[in-house]
Image (cartoon, rainbow, N blue to C red):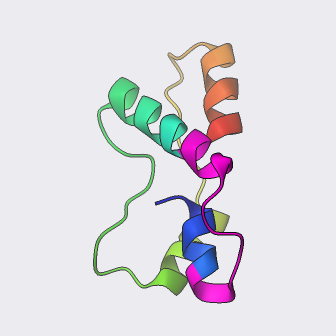
Amino acid sequence: MAPEIFQSFNSGGTGYAFEVDWWSLGVTAFEILRGWRPYDIHASNSVESLIQLFSTISVQYSPAWPKDLVSLLRKVS
């Protein structure tokens, strides 16, 4: 789930909006291209730990990917 969804559980944020779809598209594209997800998330993670994860983790993009692709993925995920 997108960070906005987790934040809405925690602090009553906006919840679902079109940004969630863009985030999901970016994560899906990353997973298709790289073979694994950009975030290490498990069902046992608490909402608070996931919000912390999204604000602190730096996604590692393949150095072989074109800069335009990386720029697009950074914008949508």
Answer whether residue 49 is magenta in the image: no
Q: Is residue 5 above or below residue 46?
A: above
Image coordinates for residue 8, horizontal then vertical, percent: 62, 77
Image coordinates for residue 65, horizontal then vertical, percent: 53, 17
Residue occupying image coordinates x 60% and y 12%: 66
In terms of secondary structure, what is the magenta stretch mainly?
Answer: helix
- Residue situated in front as seen by the camera: 73 or 61: 73
State the extent of the magenta-drawn residues as a range: 9-23
Q: Is residue 19 above or below residue 66?
A: below
- Residue situated in front as seen by the camera: 55 or 10: 10
Quarter occupied by residue 5: bottom right
Image coordinates for residue 41, horizontal then vertical, percent: 37, 65
Would you say residue 76 is visible in this rendering?
yes
- Residue 57 lies left or right of residue 64; in this view the side is right
- Residue 26 lies left or right of residue 33; in this view the side is right
Q: Is residue 28 above or below residue 33?
A: below
Image coordinates for residue 58, horizontal then vertical, percent: 60, 52
Residue occupying image coordinates x 63% and y 68%: 15
